[in-house]
Image: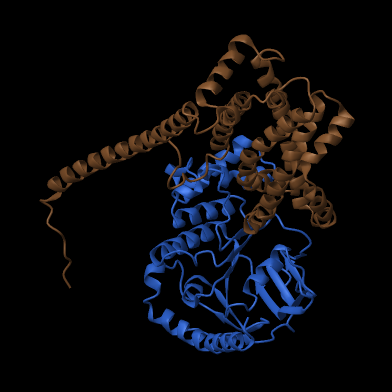
Chain colours: A brown, B blue
Amino acid sequence: MTAISPAADHAAVRDASIAVAESMAKAQLRLRHALVIGLRLAILVVFLGLWELGADYNFIDPFFFASPSGIWQQIWSWITEGTSQGPLWLQTYVTLEETFLGFVIGALGGIAAGIILGRNRLLADVFSIYIKIANSVPRVVLGSVFIIALGLGMASKVALAVVMVFFVVFANAFQGVREADRAMIANAQILGASPFQITRTVIIPSAMSWILASLHVSFGFALVGAVVGEFLGAKQGMGLLISTAQGAFNANGVFAAMVILAVMALVVEFIITRFENYVVKWRPAPFNEQGA
Amino acid sequence: MQLQPMAAGRLSQAAPPADAAIAIDDVTLRFVTPDGHMMTAIRDFTMTVARGEFACVVGPTGCGKSTTLNLVTGLLRPTTGNVRVMGNPVTDISRDIGFVFQADALFPWRSVIDNVAAGPLYRGTSKAQAYERARDWIGRVGLGRFEKHYPHQLSGGMRKRVALAQTFINQPKILLMDEPFSALDMQTRTAMQDELLGLWSEQKSSVVFVTHDLEEAVALADKVYVLTAGPGTVKSVYRIDLPRPRVMADIRYDPKFVEIAKVIWNDLREEVQLGQSRTLQTGH
């Protein structure tokens, strides 16, 4: 038997060609990135442009469907002159506060309930039927109940946001606890962990990806809860702004409030993503990270 | 060459010696399946592991190999018979026990050092001391440069090394291993077997090593238990007196090793065939 070894004199040439190939691949990646951004901008410009042109030439009736320039003028006048119910920042602040309180209370409650029921089979079997029933009630209807019970102030909106958030987070936390790896739990047990230590160091971290996934969705739900609550009866807030604009047949006003809500949601979504990346930094990087 | 079935089948009548590390005495384990049927996992099972002894358990799939380990940990309780660990009946998970799992049981959200320090921290050792010991053990399994890595950044063999360090740091008197190396490739497995034998000879723990790989069992063990097709019971016990220290890469070419493996395989083969034909008949 003879060992076969490749000739070594091509090594330098090979290294050089690898460097060239690498820099070409990098340039290609940059180009693709620029293409994605460019196409995104192009779609936005085309969409807004067609809308604006349509409104100018009355293909789209701006009275019903607004127009980008009208929406922008509305936002600008809200910023500079304030709304009919006070300055714009106060409206966004009130809605954000309600959303945020509802989100935090609902999420913490959902996580706690999910972990307790997930860890205790008897409680889970007993309560599952009631949770199903509660979950099947269209929760927006509860808004009316909360307004009657808690008044026109902040509490009724927060309560509605809480019930919107709770079930989503609960369902995910519960599932996350149930899916915790059995070998991992047994490992912790044999290494000497007490039941509380197992919950803290194994169950909660392994349910974390499930919980974080639900937080993305449920912030949107909290916002829906707050805005719908304001719709049903309020003295301040973006929901009231929308319902006032609706009453005045001011389509630009409705769209303008919608744009502001979308911006709020995107900012918070960005913050949650940052938080998620911080909390689960142990996770392998996804093969193809979306976005830029 | 000394190769003798110590006793075939029921050696349960001879009570196990009082100083044995593990004594499973005439144990039967039945449990009720979720659809209400009674299942016998193992029956009339007797096994003794002396202190510092390395015992391997081989048998066809589904014969209850892993069940025997869970009896020792206390995660499962025998229906009849009794299990003693270090002379005491098993009531709770003993602090003397270490367990290496077949699947990856490391905590993926903890770095290597946090994983290895988990045992001492759970048991109330101070943080400084736990990390000092963890660092020492990571060095012993040759992962000194990977302290801060997360499990997903390591290869399968490296993760097993972390699992060994995580288990050995508690200095278990009894080490239970459930097909720990079955997911590794051939070369890595050989390296890990050497690693294990090295750690074992330093620690003098008593080992029960479950495997479906007969050659692995013969290469590692002092004593090999062959189980029957499920419900499992001991078919025969073989003492393997190949000299130690053993080198895994060489031992498989040792004529003595080959001969022993052949004898035990003849014994095991019937059970494997029986197990397979039974699975084909019943469909599960």
* Camera-side residue of A86 and B16: A86
- Residue A282: give x, y in percent of width and height: 52, 42
Residue A227 image point, x, y percent: 71, 30
Residue found 50% across the figure and 49% down from its top: B151
Extreme residue toward the left, this view:
A9
Quadrant of the image for the C terminus of chain A? Answer: top left
Q: Pinpoint residue A277: horizontal percent, then vertical percent.
A: 53, 37
Name above or below for residue A71 compared with residue A279.
Answer: above
Front one among B230 and B71: B230
Residue A219 x, y percent position in the rendering: 65, 35
Say which residue appears at 17% left-offset and 45% top-offset: A17
Location of residue B255 (image quadrant): bottom left
Q: Is residue B220 above or below residue A104?
A: below
Q: Nearer the viewer, residue A211 or B165?
A: A211
Q: Give residue A289's quadrant in the image.
A: top left
Spot the residue most to the right: A149
Q: How many callouts does the rendering have? A: 0
Query: Can residue B174 be seen in this snapshot?
Result: yes
